[in-house]
Image (spheres, rainbow, N blue to C red):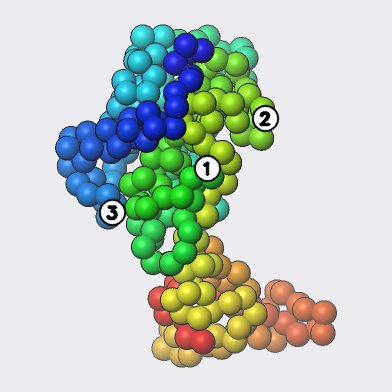
Amino acid sequence: MNEIINMNIKNIRQKRMEVSRLLMQSSSNVNSVDIDAISSDDLQLLFQLYDRIFLNNWFNLNYRGQLKFSLSRRLTRSAGLTKCPRNIASIKPEQLTLEICIGVDFFFQYNLVEGNKSVGGITTSNSLEALQLVFEHELCHVIEYVCFGTSNCSSDRFKAIAGNLFGHTGKFHSLPTNKQIASQRMGLKLGDEVSFPFKGHKFRGILYKINKRAVVMVKDKQGEFTDKQGNRYSKYYVPLSILEK
């Protein structure tokens, strides 16, 4: 693995563009740089392209375990996640299964807010590039797990792999979150008074949290939640699309 780690930034960009070109050429879902459909098969294809173009087929020639790919709409903070068994040290290499999970909504919602959208310290220009950078980050986790049995994106080793292999200079992303979308497009922020329809009635409450859906606290004498003033509330999970300020 060491002999393929060092690449200059220009080479990295060229290789990343080649990966995106071949992905759009081969995928039945991803046919432009603006992602509106994707499947786990596309992630499998993306991995194969990265292994061939960036890693000289290192995984194909050396990795004896299994690598799975999945998409999630439940990831609302992390755009990607690599799953590894806790007992990896006691697992035979040929029995090891790792999984890369991608939070798909970050890419479907990429164009819903304005501003800088960086991943790993690199400013992105479209949702496909953002997906690639997130995938690269997770691929670095996979490399660490396979080669060292542990992975931590705060460690110097991870930073060296991500930097030398893909040019990453950070570990975070600034892709659009539901909270940002609600703020920019709907003018909503936590603590706002909002209303929403429910079972033929209009309910009013306080916007408490925004994840996949909004959490609204509605005053209710029988509610199970209480504030410092003794007011009681019931909690409602509300789609952002039906909220009114």
For disc 1, the neighbor class at 10 Å (few under 14, some 14 to 19, many from 20) is many
Residue ID for mark 1: 120
Q: Residue at x 44, y 23 (%)?
A: 7
State yes or no: discs 1 and 2 in contact (Cβ < 8 Å): no
Amino acid type, residue under disc 1 in the picture: Gly
* Dot 2 crowding, Cα within 10 Å, few <14, some 14–19, many 20+: few
Taking depth in this image into account, of 96 and 58 the one nearest to the observer is 58
C-alpha span from label 1 to label 2: 14 Å
Mark 3 closeness class: few <14, some 14–19, many ≥20 residues within 10 Å: some
Q: Nearer the viewer, residue 219 or 138?
A: 138
Q: Residue at x 46, y 79 (%)?
A: 186
Q: Which mark is residue 34?
A: 3
Dot 3 or dot 2: first in sequence order is: 3
Residue behind mark 2: 155
Circle nearer the N terminus (1, 2): 1
- Find residue 154 and report its horizontal and vertical position in percent: 66, 35
Is any part of residue 175 visible from this angle? no
Residue 237 in percent (x, y) is at 52, 71
Task: Find out whether the residues at labels 1 and 3 contact each other: C-beta distance under 8 Å.
Answer: no
Q: Which of the 4 quarters of the picture holds residue 17? A: top left
Cα distance between the residues tagged 3 and 2? 33 Å
Residue 172 left/right relative to 7 = right
In this rendering, the answer to whether 20 lies above or below 203 is: above
Amino acid bearing label 3: Asp
